[in-house]
Image (cartoon, rainbow, N blue to C red):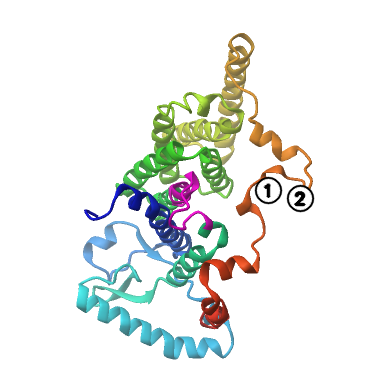
Amino acid sequence: MKSMSLNDICVYIPAWFGAIASLFTGLLAYECSLPMPVPMPASPMLHKDATKTKQYQPKYYGSILEHIPILNILYTKIVIPILTLFIKAITILFGTDLGLATNTIIPISNTYQTPHLSSPAVESGLITAMLMAIVPAHMMRSVAGGYDNESIANTAMVMTFYLWCRSLRGGVDYKSGQTLFWAILTGFSYFYMVAVWGGYVFVINLIGIHAAVLVGLGRFGPKLYRAYSIFYFIGTTLAIQVPVVGWTPLKSLEQLGPAGVFVAFQLLAFCDYYKVKKKLNVVQTWKLRVVVFAIAALVVFGLAGILDRHFGFFGPISARVRGLFVKHTKTGNPLVDSVAEHQPASSSAYTQYLGDSIVTIAPIGFLLV
């Protein structure tokens, strides 16, 4: 670095951040493909301390190759033993499996073993990172010398998504401090995203939608509540400090959705607390939720009406969002028509950025996948 000038550093920044973006995209795919921990009844064959608490064991789904006739025999009889031997060799050399194996509790001789790879998570992560690295739209913003805000914004975006998913690892188990740690990192990563690019609106809305969908799927619990509440509080508080953003996260109509999810989480947490305290049944719990949300809706809409009518607190929908509903010449969407990376990639783009030799042998890679 000492021999590099400031100009050299500026030239290489897109390439550096492009590589980091590919890495975080692979980590995101890995995180989303991990086996889901499921409760496992304590066994007397486990360690004596293990029978005192509910155990969690990753549910092994395996690779898709295990479900294809003929290939499943080759995969289970040849590939898996080779990969397992490879993992054991790595463990012996480095003292760790580098996260390539799933730590599964096996009630044999009171020991912990790792019989399964984190499949298909490892394959998903590697393939996703490789695909991200050669997507033309991403390559346009990660070529050395082609600096643009999006050159670092892409990295900030996928990093925030990865940290958010990482904060939810472990299902509904929340006793460890990892949720707090990763949620705080997610909030700071979102602040970084806000500082570098106006596309942060997409990030906060997507995370808010994801959290709301998890509630609809019956996954609301202490871990989700803590993760989203900490992320939203820290991220929004820091975002307000950015001069060009200010109070927009609380005044802009397209950002009120995530704020509504935050408020709804507080109400759900209160209902769950009251349910446990008063030992309410299912019917009583739903009645409580209806009453609490109805009262909260009246209060929120009343205050919002007063603030907007007398102080003009809430701003209109931004021109970028309104543009989504304006008919345009090519595709009917001005955002798609006006931005180069939104256009379909041409075959010449691969030749330009990868070269003739790589493009020629690229189809061979699909055979390996």
Percent across and percent down for residue 96 are 24, 70
In this view, the residue in front, 82 or 55, is 82
Quadrant (top left, top right, bottom left, bottom right) of the N terminus:
bottom left
Helix, strand or loop at label 1? It is: helix
Q: CA distance from mark 1 to mark 2?
A: 7 Å
The residue stretch that appears in magenta: 140-158
Q: Which mark is residue 59?
A: none
Quadrant of the rendered image containing residue 325: top right
The residue at which mark 2 appears reads as 331
Q: Which mark is residue 336?
A: 1
Q: Residues within 10 Å of mark 1 (few under 14, many from 20)?
A: some
Percent across and percent down for residue 266 are 47, 32
Q: Amino acid at mark 1?
A: Val
Percent across and percent down for residue 80 are 41, 84
Mark toward the start of the polypeptide (1 vs 2): 2
Percent across and percent down for residue 308 are 61, 15
Q: Are marks 1 and 2 in contact (CB under 8 Å)?
A: yes
Q: Amino acid at mark 2?
A: Thr
Q: Residues within 10 Å of mark 2 (few under 14, many from 20)?
A: few
Viewed as shown, does residue 134 lie left or right of 20?
Answer: right
> Where 253 sits versus 103, above or below?
above
> Where 21 sits versus 248, above or below?
below
